[in-house]
Amino acid sequence: MPLKKFRNGCSDTYTAKCSNNIQQMSTKLLAGFQMLSLEHRRMVASLMYLHDIGTGRITWPTTLQKVNLRVPRTGSRTKSTFQPPVARTNIFENSLLSRATYLYDRISTKDPRPDIFRVGRKQFEKILRDALGKDVDSGSTS
C-alpha cells in the first residue's frame, strides 16, 4: 500500500534525510493512488472549462467574447488554436480563461490528441490526464 511506504520512509521525526526526500515520497504516493498533483488537477479543470466553451456547454456572451480563436492560413507554421490577448495586469494574466488558452496551446503543440472541438468531454479529460501525467512542462503558465 502506498500510504504504508510513505509512513515508513518518514518514520524518523523530521530528520534532514526525511525532509530532503519529501518531494520524492509525495510523488510516489500520488502515483500509487493514481492521482495527479494539485497543480495538474487545476490544469485539467481549466482545460475542461475551455472544452465546455468550445463545445457550446457554456454560452455566456461575456465569456465567449473573451475567447480569441486563431484560424491559420493553409501551409502556415502557426500551430496555436487560441490567441490570448496581451495581459497588462497580473489579474488578467492569471485569469482562468487566459491560463486555459495559453495552456491548451502549449499542450496541443506537443500532443495533437486533445482536440476541444472533436473529442467528447470524458475522452478529453482522459487524454489530458494522460498527457499531464506523462510529461508536459510542469512549470508555471506565465
Image (spheres, grey):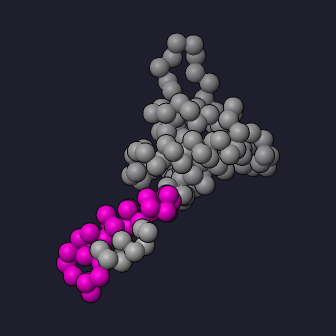
- Could you say where residue 65 lies in the image, as x and y percent from the top left? 72, 42
The answer, for residue 66, to whether it is visible in the render is: no
Q: Is residue 22 magenta?
A: yes
Asked if 28 appears above or below 44 in the picture, the reply is below
Q: Quadrant of the N terminus?
A: bottom left
> Residue 72: which quarter of the image?
top right
Instruction: Inspect this view and state whether residue 49 appears.
Output: yes
Q: Which residues are magenta?
A: 10-38
> In the picture provided, is 30 more to the left or to the right than 96?
left
Q: Tag count in the figure?
A: 0
Q: Main secondary structure of the magenta part?
A: helix
Q: Position of residue 115 (x, y in %)?
A: 62, 34
Query: Relative to the observer, which residue lies in front, 90 or 32?
Result: 32
**In the orientation shown, which residue stands out farthest toward the front?**
1
Q: Residue furthest left?
A: 16
Q: What is the quadrant of residue 24 in the picture? A: bottom left
Percent position of residue 14, x then y: 26, 83
Q: Is residue 23 left or right of residue 40?
A: left
Q: Residue at x 74, y 39 (%)?
A: 55
Magenta stretch: includes residue 16: yes
